[in-house]
Amino acid sequence: MIEVDLTSYRCPMPLIKLKKALVEYSSENEFKLLLSDRGALKDVPAFCQQMNLRCETDDSSEILVIWVRR
């Protein structure tokens, strides 16, 4: 699992960074994204759906967590 800290980024940078991580770590199947921008709760799952990736979100704390799986 690759953990990607995106807490210092605002939209659209978290999505751009996720796309880059998917390419950079092409052999990895699971990514844990740490985010602070609540807009990512819509953007990342929509992107995952388009790319046939599984996505789970946890917005129960100040830091958002989104797991992306190939």
Image (cartoon, grey):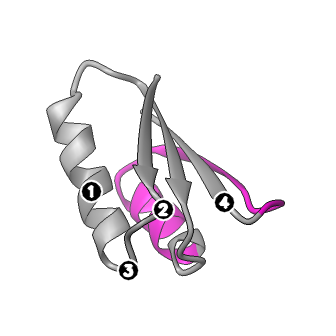
Out of 59 and 42, give the one closest to the viewer.
Answer: 59
x and y percentages locating residue 53 in the rendered image: 45, 44
> Which of the two marks, 3 or 2, is nearer to us in this view?
2
x and y percentages locating residue 59 in the rendered image: 75, 62
What amino acid is labelled 4 in the image?
Ile
* Spatial separation of the CA atoms under disc 1 and disc 3: 10 Å
Q: Earlier in the sequence, mark 2 or mark 4?
A: 2
Figure check: 49 above or below 31: below
Q: Looking at the image, which residue is at 26% across and 40% down?
A: 22
Figure check: 40 above or below 52: below
Please give the residue where the numbered disc 3 appears in the rendered image.
11
Q: Is residue 32 left or right of residue 26?
A: right
Please give the residue where the numbered disc 1 appears in the rendered image.
17
Please say if the residues under marks 2 and 4 sit with CB atoms less than 8 Å apart: yes
Q: Which mark is residue 7?
A: 2
Tell me the element at label 3.
loop
Tell me the element at label 1.
helix
Please give the residue where the numbered disc 4 appears in the rendered image.
63
Q: Looking at the image, which residue is at 24% across and 64% down?
A: 16
* Spatial separation of the CA atoms under disc 3 and disc 2: 11 Å
Residue at far front of view: 8
Figure check: 39 above or below 35: below
Please say if the residues under marks 3 and 2 sit with CB atoms less than 8 Å apart: no
